[in-house]
Amino acid sequence: MPEPTKKDESQPEVWSLGDGQAPEDLDKQIENPPLSTLLIEKPQSGSISVGGDITFIAKVEAKDLLRKPTVKWFKGKWMDLASKTGKHLQLKESFDRITKVHTFEMHIIKAKENYAGNYRCEVTYKDKFDSCSFDLEVKGWRCPSCCFALRGSEGQDDAGELDFSGLLKHSLLFSLSYYEKIAFMYGITDLRGLLRRLKKTKKEEKKSEAFAKKLEPAYQVDKGGKIRLIVDLADPTVELKWYKNGQEIRPAPKYIFEHKGTQRIMVINNCQLNDDAAYSVVAGDEKSTTELFVKVLPVNIVKELEAVKTTVNERIELECEVSEEGAQVKWMKNGVEVPTGVRSRYRVKAEGTKHWLIIDDAMKEDTGTYSIMATGGTSESHVQILLGKPLKLHCEILPINVPGRWYRNGQLIQPNDRISILHRAKTHKMEIESSVLHDAGDYTFVPEGYSQSLSAKVHIIDPPRVHLEALNAPDNTVTIVAGNKLRLEVPISGEPAPRVVWMKGERVSMQQPGKRALGGNRVRAETFTDHTSLTIDVAEREDTGNYKIVLQNEAGEDTASVKVKVVDIPDAPGSPLVPEVGGDWCSMTWDPPHYDGGSPILGYFIERKKKQSSRWMRLNFDLCKETTFEPKKMIEGVPYEVRIFAVNAIGVSKPSEPSKPFIPLAVTSEPTMLVVDDVTDTTVTMKWRPPDTIGAAGLDGYRVEYCIEGTDEWIVANKELTEKTRYTITGLTMEDKILVRVKAINAAGESPPRTTQHSILVKEVIEPPKIRIPRHLKQTYIRKVGEVVNLVVPFVGKPRPKVNWLKDGEAIEPSQVSIRNSDCDSIIFIRKAERKHSGKYKLTVQVEKHMDTALLDIQIVDLPGPPQCVRIEEVWGVNVALDWTPPKDSGNAPITGYTIQKADKKTMEWYTCLEHYHRTCITISELVVGNEYFFRVFSENMVGLSESATTTKDIAVIMKEGLQLKSPEYIDYDFTEAPKFTQPLVNICAIAGYNTTLNCSVRANPRPKVIWMKNKIIIVDDPRYRMFSNQGVCSLEIRKPSPFDGGMYTCKAINDLGEAQVDCKLEVKGQSVNSECVVLI
């Protein structure tokens, strides 16, 4: 096999026609192929050698087409070749005016290998469509080397085998004959059968990670309509982009992007032919494509042509109305298209949906059948041109054969096609075939050679006519904006000059040349020789109506009507109603204005504001065509008002009255975790959790409904809403199966229901009892005397178990211990615990023959008693050995230690020597020589120290060893003294928030007890006060005082010999007072 040829790297880059059409697409049958309505000659398939040229030709007959059709050339399915024209591809078109045939050509120059494939030609003209597919085969090229890649590599067992799947993937451009060559080369006898089997193989579609639902394959919309392209995202947070023919679409009035949950919507407004394109949406790395087809509706004739009957030299207007603005139409006369060039007698005019054919000066030859052609039909009208009456003048002259001449108003009359002059013998005749107004005058016949002449006066009368066509107003309707000046000038004709009468309703004004008021000075009519006019200085709504013009002369009468339409801004619409509200939206409706201003309502503007605000915000920039609207993006729970403006061609109306205030409120989400809590023979108890989303409307309660299986009727279980998340449905029949649902209710309405997944059988099931002892009750439960004991022991069991309590094997007295039992727990309650409440409590729970027990150990503890006896065992040096016995009452708790204190006989002030000591004997050291000591011991348990201590009866004297000093006897001085304040308290002023201190000094022996009082009330354990006493100086610190801390403060000192007290006044001022504290003395 020859080596595949390689592409010359030096060769310049050329355009690529793509990869063509896959072989499996060639076998697809086109369902319901469209009938060819445009192509009279289709391009045919062809073959070409590499480097050769080929031309494909398509022809379209233009006999019934008003404009050139649109032709597109494609390669494969979607590749538009219009963007590929250049050195190797040229598109040409031509038109033969004789045969009226459009010819479209596609030239391929110097074809390359990848030009082979399937091509398509599409022809479009308005609502007509035709297409044709053809193939191009490029011969003389070899298969790319990638098609013959061998699977495997050096060292592998299967090296050298043909990768046929790779061959198929890279050979989609091959013709079937080339497939057969490859099959024959490798021994494959039925390649076509193999391809068919591969085609039938099920392809596993890869599930999209970005899209839950992609775009539809194609969409269709009428021209001028609106289309919505919708995708559903699996991940709402992914970034989304829309494209049209590969170009990104930006938000604009034509393209509106909407978000609704996981849906992403693109709305295309006012679809035109240029919107017929391929659209795609990209989410992350994934893409979804579709194609939009814009359907052009046929142009129908709405108003038919009317027959016309007139005379020569008159103006003719043929009027027709079609269904679409800007439509292309064709005017015909007797089956031949009417010429409308610059020099033509025919003029064509179009305004909106109306079309006119105008003949300014009618001739007899203009008589015929006129028609107008549109894509949706034709309309015909017969036009007849009549001539004026003939005029004959004759006279007789003797002698005979005397020639003469005819004159009109002194001008010689020459014979022509219309005027003939005859002379026979003595008779002279002048005949005018069709007389017109300018034929009137003084006619004179002058015989030659004679001074005498014959004269005659010819008076031609013309019936009066109103020439409304000069107004150039459709349907003879003149529109004027209110407040402006209107002047209508209507040409008239008639001989003699006609009498003019203007009429509106019952008001009549007979006009002679000059002026005459029709409706006061503001409305007046004027008549001149060749026209009459109507003037309205300041147009008002009341001036709207039909104005009739009546012309009369001796030749006849003519009437015409002109409709004057005074347009104004419309009245304000009715106040809008808001029948429905949601979480951030509402629906509103309103009535159109009573008066539309004489011009159709084009739409409405909607404005919204918060009730407390005065700023209105417009909600729509495109007019709303309907009388309903849905404002969105409102704040839930905030009251709003809306109002409406009506818009017509003149302007915007005044705003409507605001709507009644409304509050956007959303229903809650459905309740969660609905489960069965309990079932008996007649009841079912359900419980649930509150909704995840409640919103500004709050939650008023829940409604519970149930439905018996097999029926569709939901029965309300609770007539009134329940605020609890647990409810028992009563009055049920045993053995019934029911479904239960729960709805959350608030001011916005009912939430979606939460329904049980399976039916519930109404029948109680025996459940053996089981006591679930809390962890803290599995060990001894300890409480102090006087504390509250409240123990809850839960259990399960159905039906309701029987509960029994025992204390130390005996029944519990209700007066000592309160017990309350429920369906699921038992509570033991002691208001004020005493030591006698200690013991072993046994709980028994029984359901029929099933039983469960639990044992609780309750221990009530108290402070211990003091040790029984404290003795001084030995004194040596500066050491004293003590011994004592444990207390009789341990407080129902183990003794955890002892506290030993000492006191000098002189001062009797006790000092702690050791705390939390565990033994019952101790040696106290480092005593002062020469002092005498007493000792006492407190016992301690888990509650605390004993209330009293046991003191030694004996005194321990610390003597100095080896020195015997005989002390002289002195009379001791009595230092005892009743309390006396040496420095009293003083009145002070403090600043709120800054600490202040009250100071005084006292002298007394023994040491007095100091008490502080505020307003005669003792200050005890108040964290705002700190009390100090050092060397007779007493201090009271008040932390960050407030004005409420002001008052009378007292310091009182007490000992065995008496008492004394001092007072002072404290005033606390606020921090804003910019002054210094003043000490009042």
Image: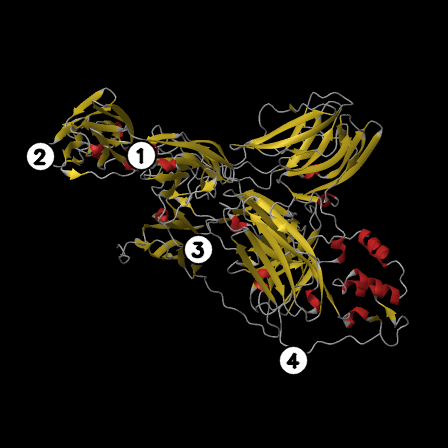
Q: Earlier in the sequence, mark 2 or mark 1?
A: 1
Q: Earlier in the sequence, mark 2 or mark 4?
A: 4
Residue at mark 2 to residue at mark 4: CA–CA distance: 110 Å
Can residue 393 be seen? yes
The three-letter code of the residue at mark 4 reads Ser
The three-letter code of the residue at mark 1 reads Val
Helix, strand or loop for disc 2: loop
Compare residues 387 and 431 and report the one nearer the observer.
431
The three-letter code of the residue at mark 3 reads Met
Q: Earlier in the sequence, mark 4 or mark 1?
A: 4
| Disc 3: CA contacts within 10 A as few (<14), some (14-19) or many (>=20) | some
Residue at mark 2 to residue at mark 1: CA–CA distance: 39 Å
Which residue is found at the position 71% from the left and 30% from the top? 823
Can residue 533 be seen? no
Q: Residue furthest bottom?
A: 10
Q: Earlier in the sequence, mark 3 or mark 1?
A: 1
Q: Which mark is residue 10?
A: 4
| Disc 4: CA contacts within 10 A as few (<14), some (14-19) or many (>=20) | few
Mark 1 and mark 2 in contact (Cβ < 8 Å)? no
Q: Which mark is residue 312?
A: 1
Q: Nearer the viewer, mark 2 or mark 3?
A: 2
Helix, strand or loop for disc 4: loop
Q: Nearer the viewer, mark 2 or mark 4?
A: 2
Residue corresponding to mark 3: 1027
Compare residues 838 and 164 and report the one nearer the observer.
164
Residue corresponding to mark 2: 451
Query: Would you say 251 lies left or right of 164 here?
Result: left
> Quarter-wise, where is residue 734 in the image?
top right
Residue 260 sits above or below residue 804 on the image: below
Residue at mark 3 to residue at mark 4: CA–CA distance: 105 Å
